[in-house]
Amino acid sequence: RRVHGIRSMPKKASKPLETLIAKLTNPQAKDFLEKMLVFNPYKRQSAEDLLAHPYLHALHDPNDEPVSHAKFHWEYDQKPMKEPELRQLFWEEICKFHPNPDLENQQT
């Protein structure tokens, strides 16, 4: 059902990143973002490939970046949700990583 919904949406040409991020002048950063933000997950670079991208050279440590061969399972994948419910779940997930009482009260 969801795939049909996405496929039925009108196709849009992508916008150049420079129009969305005016200060994007680093060619490696631009290349990294373009590879990371590919809509089609089958054409998108893997996390492992992106971690090895030259833009992240200073941060990349293959000895400290374990690779999981298990498929990621998100418990909500099979549950049909409307936008408000999905937004709330995203917000709750964000708050887990950024515990701030002021932020938590904003969304709910």
Image (cartoon, rainbow, N blue to C red):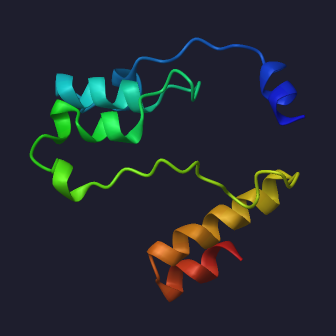
Residue 32: % across, % down? 30, 30
Look at 90% across and 34% down and name the residue there: 1
The front one of 105 and 27 is: 27
Q: Is residue 1 above or below residue 62?
A: above
Left or right for 103, reference 45: right
Q: Is residue 25 visible?
A: no
Quadrant of image for the C terminus:
bottom right
How many numbered discs, if any? 0
State the image quarter where residue 53 is shown: top left
Left or right for 55, reference 35: left
Residue 4: % across, % down? 86, 25
The front one of 15 and 42 is: 42
Left or right for 36, reference 96: left
Look at 58% across and 11% down and name the residue there: 13
The front one of 99 and 36 is: 36
Look at 24% across and 33% down and name the residue there: 23
Give the farthest residue toward the bottom. 101
Give the farthest residue toward the left. 58
State the image quarter where residue 46 is shown: top left
Look at 39% across and 41% down and name the residue there: 47
Q: Is residue 89 above or below residue 5?
A: below
Residue 44: % across, % down? 48, 27
Q: Is residue 44 visible?
A: yes
